[in-house]
Image (tube, rainbow, N blue to C red):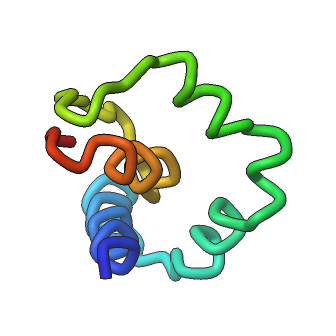
Amino acid sequence: MRSRIAVWRIAVNLEVYCGTALTLEPYCRTLLLAHSDAWQKPEAILDALHLKRTSIVADIGAGTGYFSVRIAKRIPEGKI
């Protein structure tokens, strides 16, 4: 559900800024492919942040939510 909302928001923003409607689902799917983990190393990055269960995080430029979802799982009592 959240990923669909993110895709919709991106589509609306691109339509407003670029003046054209784009089909973004295929593009977003490529961003979220499992092999992205190999080069982005999300778990190592999140480990380096030393997040606590109650942390409050601002994911600036979250895009498709690639990191947002992972952060949310680590801070069940926090906010993102």
* Residue 17, x across and y down, in percent: 31, 53
**In this picture, residue 41 sits left or right of residue 60:** right
**In the image, 54: left or right of 67?**
left
How many marks do you count on the picture?
A: 0
Quarter of the image for the N terminus: give it.
Answer: bottom left
In percent of width and height, residue 58 lies at 24, 30
Which residue occupies the foreground of this view, 17 or 44?
44
Residue 31, position in %: x, y?
66, 60
Query: Vertical placement of 41 versus 64: above or below?
Result: above
The quarter of the displayed image where residue 26 is located: bottom right
Q: Looking at this view, is 56 or 13 the one in front? A: 56
Residue 35 vertical placement versus 25 (above, below): above
Q: Nearer the viewer, residue 64 or 26?
A: 64
Res 47 → quadrant: top right
Image quadrant assignment for residue 15: bottom left
* Picture quarter with the C terminus: top left
The residue shown at (37%, 53%) is: 73
Image position of 56 with respect to 18: above or below? above
Q: In percent of the image, x 83 and y 59: which residue is there?
A: 35
At 63% from the left and 70% from the top, the residue drawn is 27
Q: Is residue 55 left or right of residue 65?
A: left
Residue 55 against residue 28 in the figure, above or below: above
Which residue is rendered at x = 39% and y = 73% of the image?
3
